[in-house]
Amino acid sequence: MIKLFHVTKRYGRDNRALDDVSLRLHKGEFAFVTGHSGAGKSTLMRLLFAAEKPTEGEVLVAGHNVGRLDRTSIPILRRNIGVVFQDFKLLQQRTVFENVAFTLEVLGRPRHEIRDRVRTILRQVGLAHKSKSLPLRMSGGEQQRVAIARALVNEPMVLLADEPTGNLDTQLSLEIMALLEAANARGTTILVATHDLSLPETLGKRVITLEHGRIKSDK
């Protein structure tokens, strides 16, 4: 589902954010990528949803070669990828329902399908009662649930989460992980970038550790 072959990403001549990285995530796998700030976690995630292209090597996601995609092809790739950002990136002037529905509206899905899917995913993340609320009136944990609902509403093949629990306490972090595990159980391949080593240890998942842009360990 995700394959990287000798991937290097440089910014300028000497700054290597990633350096000769090779890894593979199989369909339906749940893995964490960890490392200190500046290790290359966010760069890796950006490559996977085609916000960046590799300087060298190949990045394959859901059958697409990211480095060879032109602008018109990137939206096709992203239809198969859900992304959860650390800062949520919610539309603050839209309700919870409208935030989650936005993904399907962009894809041109019928109104009745949008309504049904949004209601279903909001129930799954425990926010059915908040569908008419604005994000600014919600807690950080609730906003993160909205972001996850938006990422999952299209039933993506791959979910990428960049520090999804970075601003949450331990209990809320575990609740967010439970939502991701539920999505994984339904078949979504999940990769979570985090600096919190307790999460993969608690969940017993695969851990890929980056250091200075290279894979230090993978177990």
Image (spheres, helix red, strand yellow):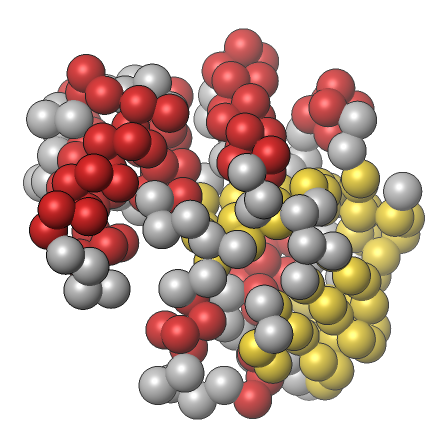
- x, y percent for residue 199: 69, 25
Q: Dividing the image into 4 quarters, which one contains the N terminus?
A: bottom right
- x, y percent for residue 45: 58, 58
All told, the count of numbered labels is 0
Q: Horizontally, is 73 left or right of 31 in the view? A: left
Residue 124: quarter of image: top left
Q: Dividing the image into 4 quarters, which one contains the C terminus?
A: top right
- x, y percent for residue 146: 31, 33
In the depicted view, which residue is nearer to us: 77 or 211?
77
Residue 2: quarter of image: bottom right
Residue at 46% in and 53% down:
156
Residue 93: quarter of image: top left
- From where the camera sits, is residue 84 visible? yes
In the depicted view, which residue is nearer to us: 94 or 16?
94
User: Height in image: 27 above or below 14?
Assistant: above
- From where the camera sits, is residue 11 visible? no
Q: Horizontally, is 13 left or right of 93 in the view? A: right
User: Height in image: 103 above or below 183?
Assistant: below
In the depicted view, which residue is nearer to us: 166 or 80?
80
In the depicted view, which residue is nearer to us: 123 or 204?
123
User: Height in image: 64 above or below 139?
Assistant: below
